[in-house]
Amino acid sequence: MLAFLVSAIRLGMTFLLGSTGETITEKSGHLNLGIPGVMCVGAACGCYAEYIYLSVAGRAAIPVLAVLIPILAALIGAGVMGLLFSFLTVTLRANQNVTGLALTTLGVGISDFMIDKTGSIFSKGSKYFTASLPFAEDLGWFGELFLSHGVFVYLAIVIALATSFVFNRTRVGLHLRAVGENPATADAAGINVSLYRYAATCIGCGIAGLGGLSFIMDYLNGNWEYCIDAIGWLAIALVIFTVWKPNLAILGSIVFGALYIASSYIVGVSFAGKELFKMLPYLVTILVLVITSMRSKKNQPPQSLGLPYFREER
């Protein structure tokens, strides 16, 4: 059970980073279905940067740089994908749903191309991301459950809590929510709608890209697998599951992680049964969506989510 919970937390942080990034984007009124592709690009850019740095530095590699360089590369790569999405949907006013799906296809292709240039194993770099606190083993089950994780687990939680604080306690968060709820009113109040949507989408995509890098370097210990796009769809589902609240997503991500890997800890489950278990997060999300739609008017998506804004029609 302890190993199961630790693994659920590690995988859950991938979902948490992806959903936090998507929540930031959706709060501005943008529905970005390209998150799976964005996470693929973030993972590929981070792994590629790690490969280049370790190839150049060799045994003289500095652990801090071995972590910061891939994180920065993932942020930039995924942020560029967000910039592309914003340009198409805000400036060119393209359909957000179609653009997001195209972005997913593009992101998967880019990551396949980049990884084919390096090989698929990055275990040398993974050890820097999975390193835990030195005294964790001395604290028994408490240390293993809460202190034995790598940098991404704590980074994901900090980002989620900081995002929740910005949404609810700052003027920037208030303006962002206003843009997502009613961009015409926000525009009339002097808020730059296009700027907020550009910034929210790029920042959100950058954070989601870190989720892709976390999946490869932390959860898979540097072994590349072409299933990041599936994780990306679950990250989008987590946004609905946690009713657009990043702080609630911390617990929700662990639940998703536990449901996703549950079949691996149950003896005698066939391959088909394992795939059915992986459907549980989606089924739970549908159930939550139905319940919140029927009973609560507060826990709803931004009113302008997925709708383009034309200032001339105000």
Image (spheres, rainbow, N blue to C red):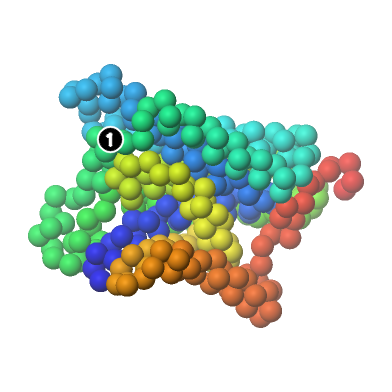
Q: Quadrant of residue 126?
A: top left
**Residue 225, image x, y percentages:** 40, 44
Check the image and report above or below for 297 versus 45.
Answer: below
Please name the residue shown 54% across and 47% down the image: 36
Q: Quadrant of residue 83?
A: top right
Residue that lies at the very extreme toward the right in this rendered image: 313
Q: Nearer the viewer, residue 66 or 275?
A: 275
Residue that lies at the very extreme toward the left in this rendered image: 138
Check the image and report above or below for 203 versus 283.
Answer: above
Please name the residue shown 74% across and 56% down the image: 304
On the rendered image, what quadrant is the N terminus found in? bottom left
Task: Please say whether residue 108 is visible from this viewpoint.
Answer: yes
Q: Judge left or right: residue 2 versus residue 203.
A: left
Check the image and report above or below for 110 versus 271.
Answer: above
Check the image and report above or below for 58 versus 282.
Answer: above
**Residue 2, image x, y percentages:** 23, 68
Task: Please say whether residue 199 is visible from this viewpoint.
Answer: no
Quick one: label 1, few (<14), some, or many (20+) residues within 10 Å?
many
Q: Judge left or right: residue 9 versus residue 280.
A: left
Which structural element holds mark 1?
A: helix
Q: Total marks drawn?
A: 1
Q: Which residue position holds label 1?
A: 125
**Residue 131, image x, y percentages:** 22, 45
Q: Nearer the viewer, residue 99 or 203?
A: 99
Q: Judge left or right: residue 136 versus residue 173.
A: left
Q: Judge left or right: residue 249 versus residue 5.
A: right
**Residue 269, image x, y percentages:** 36, 71
Q: Quadrant of residue 205?
A: top right
Please name the residue shown 28% across and 22% down the image: 55
Residue that lies at the very extreme toward the top in this rendered image: 56
Q: Amino acid at mark 1?
A: Gly
Residue that lies at the very extreme toward the bottom in this rendered image: 295
